[in-house]
Amino acid sequence: MASNLEVIEAFHRAMEEYWRTGDDAPLMAIFDPACTFSVPGMPDTLEGMRQALPAFRQAFSDIAIHTGETVSEGDMIGYRMSFTGTHSGDFMGISPTGRRIFMSETHIERIRDGKIVLHSGNTDMLGLMQQVGALPGPN
């Protein structure tokens, strides 16, 4: 059985594969079909996330995922991660800017039998919206 860290590493590899190819099958295989999601502003089911992901893939090219600190206890793992990429397509009505973006996230996952059964986290959407020019940035 894979360790919690191995499951998260496989999740991140599958995310990067999805960004490159658009094939979400390896990504979906990491989640339990009944997985629940608790990320502000995002759908709370696996099917909902599957429908939401293409908007991000279309809007941001050359995505790279960077995993930061991790903490694991029992069936839970918490970690920091970040995305870098280029705003190269429409995002939530915002035309492409060509700007490089950096988005940080913090997640806590519950893993059971090698599958993610709970995906919770916070994403710096304010920072992202500032970077794409939708909101004013700090002075």
Image (spheres, rainbow, N blue to C red):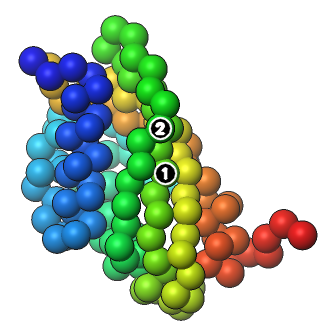
Q: Amino acid at mark 2?
A: Gly
Q: Which residue was labeled with disc 2? A: 68
Classify residue 94 as left or right of residue 25.
right
107 over 72 or under it: above or below: below
**Residue sitting at x 47%, y 64%:** 84
Q: Quadrant of the N terminus?
A: top left
**Residue sitting at x 22%, y 29%:** 6
The answer to whether residue 121 is seen in the rendering is no
Secondary element at tag 1: strand
Q: Amino acid at mark 1?
A: Ser
**Residue sitting at x 14%, y 22%:** 2
Classify residue 118 as left or right of residue 22.
right
The answer to whether residue 53 is seen in the rendering is yes
Secondary element at tag 2: strand
Classify residue 129 as left or right of residue 98.
right
x, y percent for residue 73: 39, 11
Residue at the far top: name it: 74
121 over 104 or under it: above or below: above
Q: CA distance from mark 1 to mark 2?
A: 8 Å
- Name the foreground residue: 28 vs 65: 65
For disc 2, the neighbor class at 10 Å (few under 14, some 14 to 19, many from 20) is few
133 over 30 or under it: above or below: below
Give the quadrant of residue 21.
bottom left
Q: Check whether the beta carbons of the residues at disc 1 and disc 2 lie within 8 A of each other.
A: yes
Q: Quadrant of the C terminus?
A: bottom right
Report the number of numbered marks: 2
Q: Which residue was labeled with disc 1? A: 82
Q: Which comes before the other along the chain, label 1 or label 2? A: 2
Classify residue 135 as left or right of residue 76.
right
